[in-house]
Amino acid sequence: MTLRLRLTLVAATVVAAVVAIASLFVYFVMRHDLRKQVDDALIAHAGFVQHHPDDALPQGPGGFGQFTGDFVQVVFGDGSSVRNQYGTNARVLPLDARVQNVAKTRKTYFLRDVTINKARWREIVAPLPPPLGAVMIVRPLADVDHELKRLRLILLLVTLGGIGAAAIAGALVSRATLAPVRRLTAAAERIAKTGDPSERVEASGGGELARLGTAFNTMLAALEESIETQRRFVADASHELRTPLTSLQTNIEVLKQQERLGPEQRAQLFADLEREAHEMRNLITGLLELARGDANLERTEVQVDEIVESAVDRARARFPNVHFNAHIEPTVVEGIPERLERAVWNLLENAGKWTASGSSVDVTLSAGELRVRDHGPGIAAEDREHVFDRFYRSAAARSLPGSGLGLAIVREVAEAHGGSVSAEDAPGGGALLRLRFAGS
């Protein structure tokens, strides 16, 4: 069952219930009013008889003018002998214990429905002064029943008409209301079919469906950006891998003719192959780091100061001609140890690579921030906004080994941990890179 049909059925059901309740209310109110009119007339007739007992029985079926249509029967005090308005002693109206009790005790009157010759009547039994006992007056309910029958038919038609109108209105309203949902569905189906997330849906107004459309467009924009980033990543990775692969292939082709090469040339070729293989390994490692992200890695409390101390010791061994000055304060963050180790090492490796032999690198961890300051050439203004982009290598860096992924991984790790990273010129020359952790 479609949502539109469900909304239509709900609207029709609700209106049907409301109209049915209203119709029942109207019916019972009208029924009460009509029967009350009959009861009031019978009470008035009985009161007239009580005040004029000598005229209790009109001659003939016509009755008194204002009580025309009523039938009167008098019960004497013994509760058994009767007389009716035809002047006979025939018991036209049935006697029972209640009537006889009123005739004998002359207590208060009562009203009830009776059936005579398959016809429904309204009856009042009221006491009379001695020697009379009680008067029985009946009035036919045929007119009341006829009016109630007409009222039931009218209310039934009104109810059915209301349900039909509610169903039509519900269908129209649900169609108009669900139009944005249909557009969203159609857009989602087209995107699933074409694989193109550039399409957008109209999202005007301020209701829930407009918010849904806005959220859908936001999701599409994020999806489009993600796909574009993936495409750029694959294209950049392919481009970066092509260079060392081409060099490797060239050197291998030369090595096939090694009988023509001298020992020094062969040694140089093997050194080139080793260097290119090392660059490819580093490049592939960086690509895997970026592609893996934080998937399936558990976050724990990490002693960042221990990670920095270990990375500084490793950097001193990696760059023996560079002095690493460390000022480290105890720091604990919620994160993934392996990823944080990678980010810290990339910062120190980058600083060691740019620092001249005999110079120094200052490493400071305090107030939830890691600062790595080198004494190299610094970062050019045009490169400062791009140093954390994937595969970006400045003109000065192209002569150095590297893949252009080290600082990109640092930014990825920082953002994954709710932090940030920035680069700036250090006072007195060199570059200062800051890694801020979440909450600092």
Image (tube, rainbow, N blue to C red):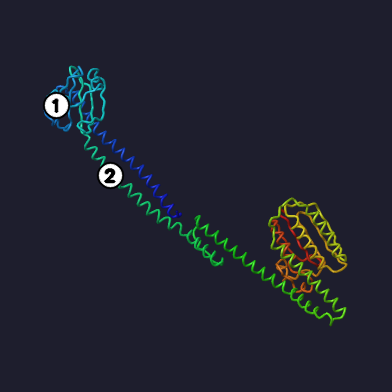
Relative placement, left or right, of 62 versus 312 is left
**Mark 2 and mark 1 in contact (Cβ < 8 Å)?**
no
Mark 1 crowd level (few <14, some 14–19, many ≥20, 10 Å Cα) = some
> Residue 107's x, y, as percent?
26, 20
How many numbered circles are shown?
2
How far apart are labels 1 and 2 at the CA level? Answer: 38 Å
Task: Identify the residue position indicated by label 2 in the image.
Answer: 153
Q: Quadrant of residue 391?
A: bottom right
Relative placement, left or right, of 175 versus 196 is left
Task: Identify the residue position indicated by label 1 in the image.
Answer: 85
- Furthest residue to the bottom? 260
- Residue at 32% in and 41% down: 26
Q: Is residue 131 above or below residue 226?
A: above
Amino acid on which the number 1 mark rests in the picture: Gln
- Residue at 15% in and 23% down: 83
> Residue 175's x, y, as percent?
43, 57
Q: Quadrant of residue 433?
A: bottom right
Q: Residue 72 or 267: which is nearer the viewer?
A: 267
Helix, strand or loop status at disc 1: loop
The C terminus - image quarter: bottom right
Q: Residue 436 or 425: which is nearer the viewer?
A: 436
Amino acid on which the number 2 mark rests in the picture: Leu
Mark 2 crowd level (few <14, some 14–19, many ≥20, 10 Å Cα) = few
Q: Which mark is residue 400?
A: none
Q: Is residue 318 above or below residue 4?
A: below
Q: Earlier in the sequence, mark 1 or mark 2?
A: 1
Q: Is residue 133 above or below residue 320?
A: above
> Residue 329's x, y, as percent?
81, 53
Camera-near label (1 vs 2) is: 2
Helix, strand or loop status at disc 2: helix
Relative placement, left or right, of 242 versus 108 is right
